[in-house]
Image (cartoon, rainbow, N blue to C red):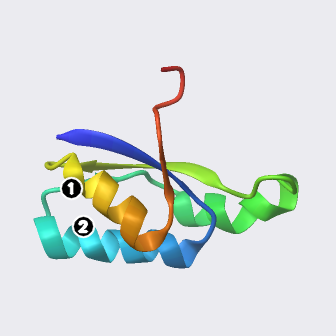
C-alpha cells in the first residue's frame, strides 16, 4: 500500500477522489479520518491558504498522478519529509 498526500480545499473534491478510489480498488484502500470536518472548518482559521493536507492509502502509486491531473489537486510530500 502507498500513502499519497494531496492538498484539498473542498469536501466535494474529497468525495470525488473517494469515489474514484472505490471504483478502481473496491474496498482495498483507506483515507484519513475526519476530513470533512477539517475541510469545512479550514476556511475559518486559514484565510491565506484554505487547502488541507489529506492522505489516501492505495495499492497503486500511479493513482496519485492520475488524480492530481484529473481533478486539478496538488500531490504533496508527507509532512516532515
Whether residue 26 is visible here, answered yes or no, is no
Residue 40 is labelled as: none
The CA span between labels 2 and 1 is 7 Å
User: How many marks can you see?
Assistant: 2
Task: Please tell me in which quadrant of the rendered image residue 4 appears.
Answer: top left
Q: Return the x and y of residue 29 as percentages of the image width and height.
A: 21, 56
Q: Residue furthest front?
A: 69
Relative side of 78 to 45, left or right: left
Pick whichever, 28 or 7, lies toward us. Answer: 7
Circle 2 packing at 10 Å, graded few (<14), some (14-19), many (20+), is many
Of discs 2 and 1, which sits in the foreground?
A: 2
**Circle 2 residue:** 21
Quick check: 59 above or below 27? above
Q: Quadrant of the N terminus?
A: top left
Characterize the local packing of mark 1: few (<14), some (14-19) or many (20 or more) Cα atoms within 10 angstroms: some
Looking at the image, residue 1 sits to the left or right of residue 9; the answer is left
Q: Is residue 60 left or right of residue 6?
A: left
Q: Is residue 11 visible?
A: yes
Residue 57, given in percent of the width and then of the height, sits at: 27, 47
Q: Secondary structure at mark 2?
A: helix
Report the residue marked by disc 1: 29
Q: Residue at position x 87%, y 57% from top? A: 47
Task: Of the two numbered discs 2 and 1 on the same chain, state the one appearing first in sequence.
Answer: 2
Give me the residue at 44% from left, 71% from top. 71
Question: Picture coordinates of residue 16 (x, y %)?
Answer: 40, 77
Give the secondary structure at mark 1.
Answer: loop
| Circles 2, 1 touching at the beta carbon (< 8 Å) | yes
Query: What residue lies at 50% left-to-right and 61% top-to-bottom?
Result: 73
Q: What residue is at 64 percent from the left and 58 percent from the top?
A: 38
Q: Closer to the camera, 66 or 37?
A: 66
Residue 15 left/right relative to 10: left
Amino acid at each position: 500500500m502507498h500513502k499519497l498526500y494531496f492538498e484539498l480545499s473542498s469536501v466535494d473534491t474529497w468525495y470525488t477522489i473517494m469515489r474514484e478510489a472505490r471504483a478502481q480498488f473496491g474496498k482495498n484502500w483507506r483515507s484519513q479520518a475526519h476530513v470533512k470536518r477539517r475541510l469545512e472548518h479550514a476556511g475559518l482559521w486559514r484565510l491565506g491558504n484554505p487547502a488541507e493536507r489529506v492522505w489516501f492509502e492505495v495499492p497503486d502509486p500511479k493513482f496519485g498522478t492520475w488524480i492530481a491531473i484529473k481533478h486539478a489537486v496538488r500531490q504533496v510530500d508527507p509532512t516532515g519529509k
